[in-house]
Amino acid sequence: MKVFITGGAGYIGSHMALSLLDQGHDVVILDDLSTGSKNLIPSKAIFIEGNISNLDLVNKILTEHKFDAVAHFAGSIQVEESIYDPVKYYQNNTVNTLRFVNLLSKSKTKKLVFSSTAAVYDISKNIIIKENNRLNPLNPYGSSKQMCEKIIQDISKSSELKFFILRYFNVAGADLKMRSGQISENSTHLIKVCVECALQKRKLVEVYGNDYDTQDGTCVRDFIHISDLISGHILALQHLIDGGNSDICNLGYGIGLSVSEVIQKVKDVSGNNFLVKIGNKREGDNPYVVADCNKIKSKYKWQPLHNDIETIIKTSLNWEKSLLV
Ligand SMILES: NC(=O)c1ccc[n+]([C@@H]2O[C@H](COP(=O)([O-])OP(=O)(O)OC[C@H]3O[C@@H](n4cnc5c(N)ncnc54)[C@H](O)[C@@H]3O)[C@@H](O)[C@H]2O)c1
């Protein structure tokens, strides 16, 4: 297959490109390098530097190549930033996706895999989240993604566009062959922050609240290894290319680990101690965010292979070490 990847110079998009190329498929990447890096782009991919809002450029790419499908990862992803700069999120995520998907629906490429997030859900109760859970995002990032979902669904109803929306939980870890990983500076992703502390790139990790109604008082999250996340995308692409209907699935493991447990695991795996500061609770943080991933397992036969926090931490640590040299 030939796949058009937006945001392919970023963390998740570059892993998608690597996986497709490893399987002998063709990849064209469009990325404006705002948070991504040329270093993450696989050499065998065709890379075009540009913004998805440049519709002339997108149109040219869609016309010049005969794509089987599009995987749309480009977007802004920091929850905290979205609270003080919501316009950036509604512009780059929602408005740009609206214009991009509108163009796509009128092109010859009518199959779209879209990156969404657990942040679209109403997570007011400590329950494992199914796809039919009520949606009620608590921050502009989540809202911007929920709006994208709605736009994609509505455009699909009025055109031949077929979509597969994947709602990710906490994505972590790095490519097992160390060809890609997280590079973002000032990351807010817990495992990245912890491995940076373990390698003395950061002074401390701050825990946002330790009196939640959870086993040890810290928030509980569902961490999924990037390679398993990508295998879910490959199934979604294949499903659409085989003529399947549009769908929405969670991607997580259905296993909750507390922030304190993860910190301790990073200390154990790295063999290094580091400072932990207990800070205030953050606005909009939910105590318990864990996926029910039975739908993608049963309906699409998704089989996670790296469902193990040690593997996630080891790959993350090794990737971070590789950035030091
Ligand atoms: N990382 C996670 O844990 C997580 C969780 C849920 C959902 N997601 C979603 O996955 C997608 C990818 O996230 P990521 O972690 O790889 O982030 P990332 O920042 O590493 O990658 C995003 C990529 O998109 C590019 N980009 C941004 N805006 C663009 C634009 N307008 N035009 C062209 N390129 C643009 C950036 O340069 C970057 O390479 C995002 O849509 C995000 O919302 C990520």
Image (tube, rainbow, N blue to C red):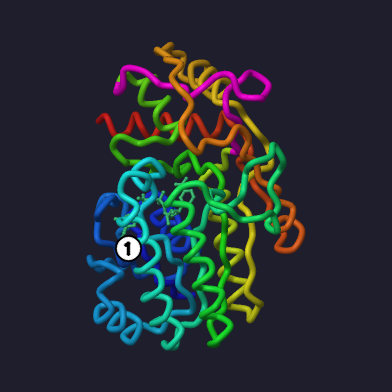
Q: Is residue 79 left or right of residue 167?
A: left
Q: So how many labels did they put on this image? A: 1
Q: What main secondary structure does the magenta stretch of the protein show?
A: loop
Q: Quadrant of residue 84?
A: top left
Name the residue rendered at 66%, 25% in the picture.
214
Asked which secondary structure carries label 1, the reply is: helix
Residue 112 in the image, given as x and y percentages of width and height: 50, 73
Q: What is the three-letter code of the residue carrying label 1?
A: Gln
Residue closer to the observer: 112 or 3 = 112
Residue closer to the observer: 119 or 271 = 119
Q: Quadrant of residue 154?
A: bottom right
Ligand 1: image quarter = bottom left
Q: Any magenta on residue 18?
A: no
Residue 83 in the image, given as x and y percentages of width and height: 37, 45
Name the residue rendered at 41%, 57% in the picture.
13
Residue 232 in the image, given as x and y percentages of width and height: 59, 57
Residue 132 in the image, given as x and y percentages of width and height: 70, 58
Q: Is residue 68 left or right of residue 133?
A: left
The C terminus, quarter of image: top left
Does 275 appear above or below 202?
above
User: Looking at mark 1, is its residue's CB closer than 8 Å to ligand 1?
Assistant: no
Instruction: Give the residues in magenta.
Output: 201-222
Does 194 appear above or below 26?
above
Residue closer to the observer: 71 or 132 = 132
The crowd level at tag 1 (other Cα within 10 Å; few <14, some 14-19, many 20+) is: some
Q: Any magenta on residue 219?
A: yes
The residue that mark 1 highlights is 91
Name the residue rendered at 55%, 87% in the picture.
158
Residue closer to the observer: 113 or 259 = 259
Q: Is residue 303 left or right of residue 219?
A: right
Name the residue rendered at 56%, 46% in the picture.
169
